């Protein structure tokens, strides 16, 4: 029995290694070739940083990065704000169709991006008669990012001792004051974690942005797609590397924030005592 269990463990370990190699090999190759002096970025020649230097001299690329950052920062602020209020309402308030509403909020996440993008395009252009551009992109990003923030913050709410809010209200605070001064600070780890997930979620989006972006509004993912249509260049490798690094850093920050929140929850009863 022990021999059989050991073989199964070795098989699962080997399978896990294979899956990780399969997933990460293209990313590693992309990063390695971003430092290659080959002008097509498809084979290794000599180590160089000139493609990273070219990022700063490429004006259309800089403009695309700035647009993506502006859109992502606005999306993070609005989505986490709406997500906090919505999560609080779904968790604390009692009303009809609460479970149905909680399920419907998931739709922008679970629907195929092509369907969401096409629906938003029709809504903006045919129903609102809106000129596509910054505003349409930001609204679209808020639409699919807010549900993510809601469920991350809801997860944090489930670990809060709501007796703190009741104590504040017993001492004369109304619900808004109790939320602002008591529950808000307790929710900060969840809000920060939601913001760290929403930022790359918005910054990396291509499909929905492609549908709702107007003429002349090029975000970084759309810029990369337009460049790939005319053949890969080493600059694309450097952009891809930066994407990977930003995403990994955001995930690490999310993990650290979640750990700090868990430690706070563990230490809180000791402090109360």
Image (spheres, rainbow, N blue to C red):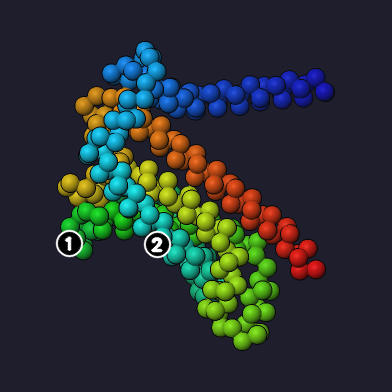
Mark 2: few, some, or many residues within 10 Å (few <14, many ≥20)? Answer: some
Q: Label 2: which residue?
A: 78
Q: Nearer the viewer, mark 2 or mark 1?
A: 2
- Res. 154 visible in picture: no
Secondary structure beneath disc 1?
A: loop
Q: Residue at x 49, y 27 (%)?
A: 24
Front-most of 260 and 127? 260
Left or right, 130 with respect to 96, comes to left
| Quarter of the C terminus within the rendering | bottom right
Q: Residue at x 48, y 50 (%)?
A: 196
Q: Residue at x 45, y 60 (%)?
A: 80
| Quarter of the N terminus within the rendering | top right
Furthest toward the bottom, the residue is 172
Q: Residue at x 48, y 67 (%)?
A: 86
Q: Position of residue 42 (x, y in %)?
A: 34, 18
Q: Label 1: which residue?
A: 129
């Amino acid at each position: 029995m022990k021999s059989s269990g050991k073989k199964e463990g070795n098989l699962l370990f080997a399978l896990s290694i294979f899956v990780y190699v399969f997933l990460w090999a293209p990313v590693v190759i992309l990063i390695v070739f971003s430092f290659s002096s080959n002008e097509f970025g498809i084979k290794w020649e000599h180590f160089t940083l000139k493609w990273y230097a070219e990022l700063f001299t490429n004006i259309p690329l800089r403009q695309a990065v700035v647009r993506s950052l502006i859109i992502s920062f606005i999306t993070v602020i609005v989505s986490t704000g709406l997500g906090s209020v919505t999560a609080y309402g779904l968790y604390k308030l009692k009303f009809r169709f609460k479970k149905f509403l909680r399920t419907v909020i998931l739709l922008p996440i679970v629907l195929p991006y092509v369907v969401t993008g096409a629906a938003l395009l029709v809504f903006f252009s045919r129903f609102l008669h809106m000129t596509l551009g910054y505003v349409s992109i930001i609204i679209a990003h808020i639409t699919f990012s807010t549900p993510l923030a809601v469920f991350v913050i809801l997860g944090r709410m489930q670990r809060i001792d709501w007796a703190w809010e009741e104590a504040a209200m017993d001492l004369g605070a109304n619900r808004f004051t109790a939320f602002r001064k008591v529950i808000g600070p307790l929710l900060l780890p969840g809000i920060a974690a939601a913001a760290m997930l929403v930022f790359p979620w918005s910054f990396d989006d291509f499909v929905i942005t492609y549908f709702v972006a107007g003429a002349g509004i090029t975000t970084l993912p759309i810029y990369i797609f337009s460049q790939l249509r005319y053949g890969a260049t080493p600059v694309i490798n450097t952009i891809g590397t930066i994407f990977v690094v930003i995403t990994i850093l955001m995930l690490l920050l999310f993990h650290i924030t979640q750990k700090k929140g868990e430690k706070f929850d563990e230490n809180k009863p000791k402090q109360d005592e």
